[in-house]
Amino acid sequence: SDNPTDDNTSTYGAEMLRQLKQTGVESISARSEYVAIDPDGKKLTSSTGTSEWRHKDSKAKTHYSFNEFTGEVESRVYNSEGTLVRYNGKHLSSNNSQYQTNIVLQLSDNETVRNATNALTSKHPDNSYIAKMNDNGKLTVYDLSGNEVSLNVNGKYRINVVAHGSEMAAIGAEQLATYITDLQTKLRIEQTEQGRIALVGCETDKPSSSGTSTEITSLAQLVAQRLYDGGNGTINAEVTGRTTQIEVNANGTKTMLTGGTKTVYSWDTDKGGISQKTETVKNHSEALKNPLINLNEEIQRLEELLKSTSEKQSKHSNLLSRTLYAFRIFHEVQEYELGFYHSDLKAFKLNFDEHLRTNPNSEIIGELNRVNAVLQDFIVDIEAQDLRRTEQSVRQSVLLVREKYEATKVLEVDDKVKKLKRTHGWLLSLASRSSEMHEQLKHDILAIEHEIQVAEESQVKLKKWKVENTRQDHITDPFVGYIRQVIITTENDSTLIQDELRLAEKYPDNTTIVHMDKNGNYKVVYGLKLDQIPKGDIKIVINAHGNSEGIINRSIKEIAEHISIIDRATGEGSVIRKVSLVACSLEGGYAERFLPELRKKGVSNTKVSVRLADVRVGVDGRKIMSDSEGVFRKYRSNALKKTYAFNEKGEVITVDSYTDEHYDVTLSIDKDGSPKIERIYGNKRLSELKGALKVFVKAEGLSETEQMLHQFKDILPSGASISHLNIKTPKDNDWFTQSNVLQQTQNLDNFGGRLNASVVVHSDSEDAQVSLAARYRDSGVRIVKGDTRFVKDPLMSKNVMAILEIGGLESNQQQLAFRGDDFDADISVKILHVGEDYPTTRETLENLGLISQVTQQSIADIDIIVSTTENPGHYLELVKALSDKYKVTITVRKEIASSALVEWLSKTPQDSDVIVHTSPHLAETQPHNDQKLQDWDTPSQEQIDKLTAEAQKTKPGLANHDHQVLIQTEPDDNIKDSTLKLAFKHPTKTTIVQMDKDGAYRVVYGTQLKDITGKV
């Protein structure tokens, strides 16, 4: 065990191998240090024999083998990286090369070959040279500084011949051997040891499809034959080639595609012929990034060809684009996968042949013929490979197809259908090989056929789901703690579609929306595709309806599978850290049953949150829960939101639902009033903060908190700023107990404005008077107080109060909106009723009393806007009651289209009764107005501005059409107004045409007729 084989005086290893030669042993290894075997069977070495035992200490192991040229025993020692550091007992130079001279014969000047040449020579810079040939065939040798040199090579040498395999094949073995012989002559080789000629290109030892085992079939064999010349040529040099793709890495090492072999050819003097052996390759890979294969060059040439816009190539562009797409696929797949594409490739080749027949005189016929020849070579190679397939390789193909089938299950439904059909074709092809194989694959074929049917049905249904446009042009809160949120909507339901829109618009740059049906088939309708999401932590939001029994129309297993699909589709490196179940009234037991199901699906390191009450997503994307009275006023309630996770023992436990871990900074106020930094995301230092910051604040009073925040703002590094503040007020310091609501909105707006940040304020108390107050960057403010939302909207008219009343609920709920500056005159009140539900007369009277919380100004008039006139009795009663109480003009108007209203009911203080107005309609015709077109009025600028404003809003899509054209047939005001009302519904999809009786027309709004596309 202490054999000193690392000592150049040792003969033990060499003598042992000589004596074993007669038994056929070609190599042995021995250790130069003390050896022990551990209980697991591992060999350990130690320089002392008592301590520091090491496993796989390469330098303590010496390899002995026979020199192919001299027959003498050689010894080699490698380091842990596989680099030769000792040869025949001698330490190598810093180059770690067994060759005294390394020469690279660079045969072409494309980027891949240049990079390979530079990497090979940089590996051994002290003894490496580059040989090149000019256009006239003159061979020149350079050092690494580019200086021409003259060499006298003495000792062991290596020539790396570098080019694409296709380039070497095009040169031919005869010419290639001549180049090598000329280089050997120029190097003036005085050889005492065997040299090596390495053909560094893809598939240089790949047998031709027509070859047999008894004839020379590879380029490397042919080159060796020419060099050795039956024993009369350069017989003292090995020739190496490889059967598959190879790439040269940046460090000068070579990596070969897994499954290939490296062959060494040499001249056997005793036998008088060429011998060959397979040599172990150190580096293998399932896929190469930059192989020295002709396909790389073909792709580059096709890309350059397609860049041209000349007329001579335009008729070929579609064919060449499809060819480029095919080459890129072949470049990525494994060699044994190519058989799956055989039928597709043959069909494509027939199309290519037909194209050549119909374009025989093309100016690029040479390029087209060359590409066609490459396609034919692929087909021949695939067919030859198929003939060589063993039973084991067929089984490997079956396993591969099954892997691909599993991979398709997480694809978006459109891609899934395509890939399933392709995989189905591969299965049928494999099944056709034998009756036994057909029987083995019968179940797989039936399963995939069922999967295709289900996916196609889902594909049709998912296309019909409503999709809203997500607004992206506004400033949003920073998204901290996750790389992205993925919203899974489970039904084509208007409320859920609205909720996903609001959730996405909170973080539009960090959101992906997925519509997923019960079968787990899905369509990405907004944001990055799942496989394009950057690696990192992901938050999943399940946007669904729920109740105490669970998520409606989904089992726990189905929801777990939905999340598993997202997990698998986003790939390795992405981790689902949070699952937020935004469904009403789920109980804690749901999450406790759900987490183990997630773990079964491979999603275990995550938290799951549930809401124990009804939940509603606000216009700002924040989730508000209802209290015991059914009023939606609970924000960040620990009592109504529970979060669960696994502990270290694998038990499901509750964890804090509202941690500060997803904020850039957490602040509190120190005893002296200065900012106290409690936490910085990612354990950064203050000086490392940059960009827009999301800050969590444990507040005191309003003035103390603002003073502290200004101090914090002053100490931030340049490039960092407060963007959003989430402020938690203590139980004993409510910011909203003083002053009226108008003053409260102004105070919060001024607070956020001075800090130039959006603000959310909520109380630590479950019984706080104001459960949520938010200030937005446009100076808008929303305060949730009991069952009422007070909204400061800077876009509203002055001295106007708008009340949105929501009827049909257990508790009367409403929203009061106003501009936000001081009221300085009597106010106009607008009451909005949406849908068929409406509050009682008593509730409306009570809601008007809420105005006193905002202002003490008197009411000047009341305008009620409704969407239906199917309940006249209620509104007649309401108008009379309001008139009796406030003694002002009361009007009820019906919304015909967006921003278009017609008067229905009215009562002034002078009227004895309510007046019912009949709205104008198109049946009330007058004699046709035959005015010529030039005398018609066009829409006013105010009307055009209204249409432009409406176009900025989210609108329903046109059913079954891409555009509508409205033809106004006369200048009658009623006709003109009706046309505009129709346009308001789809302003971005509408063109208005005025046309007189003679057919003269003009476009007065929208896309010009010649530019309209699609179904009209």
Image (spheres, rainbow, N blue to C red):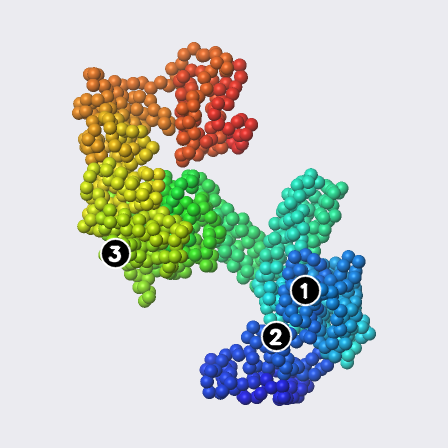
Which residue bears the numbered disc 1? 145
Does residue 645 appear to the left or right of 164 in the view shown?
A: left
Circle 3 crowding by C-alpha within 10 Å: few under 14, some 14–19, many from 20: few
Tell me how far mark 1 sits from mark 3, CA to CA.
65 Å
Q: Residue furthest left?
A: 885
Tell me how far mark 3 sits from mark 2, CA to CA.
61 Å
User: What type is the residue that disc 1 sits on?
Assistant: Ser
Q: Tell me the quarter of the picture where residue 465 sits.
A: top left
Q: Is residue 296 visible?
A: yes
Which residue bears the numbered disc 2? 94
Residue drawn at the location 55% of the way across and 54% of the way down:
423
Work out whether 608 lies above or below 993. Answer: below
Does residue 787 appear to the left or right of 62 in the view shown?
A: left
In this orientation, which residue lies closer to the viewer: 248 or 970? 248
Give x and y (percent) for residue 272. 79, 77
Residue drawn at the location 64% of the way across and 43% of the way down:
318
Q: Which quadrant is the N terminus positioned in?
A: bottom right
Work out whether 305 lies above or below 1012. Answer: below
Circle 1 crowding by C-alpha within 10 Å: few under 14, some 14–19, many from 20: few
In this orientation, which residue lies closer to the viewer: 694 or 495? 694
Give x and y (percent) for residue 320. 65, 46
> In front: mark 1 or mark 2?
1
Give x and y (percent) for residue 913. 21, 18
Q: Tell me the quarter of the picture where residue 190 sits.
A: bottom right
Identify the mark nearer the N-term, 1 or 2.
Answer: 2
User: What type is the residue that disc 3 sits on?
Assistant: Asp
Tell me how far mark 1 sits from mark 2, CA to CA.
19 Å
Residue drawn at the location 37% of the way across and 28% of the way down:
898
Residue drawn at the location 50% of the way across and 23% of the way down:
1003
Q: Tell me the quarter of the picture where residue 979 sits.
A: top left
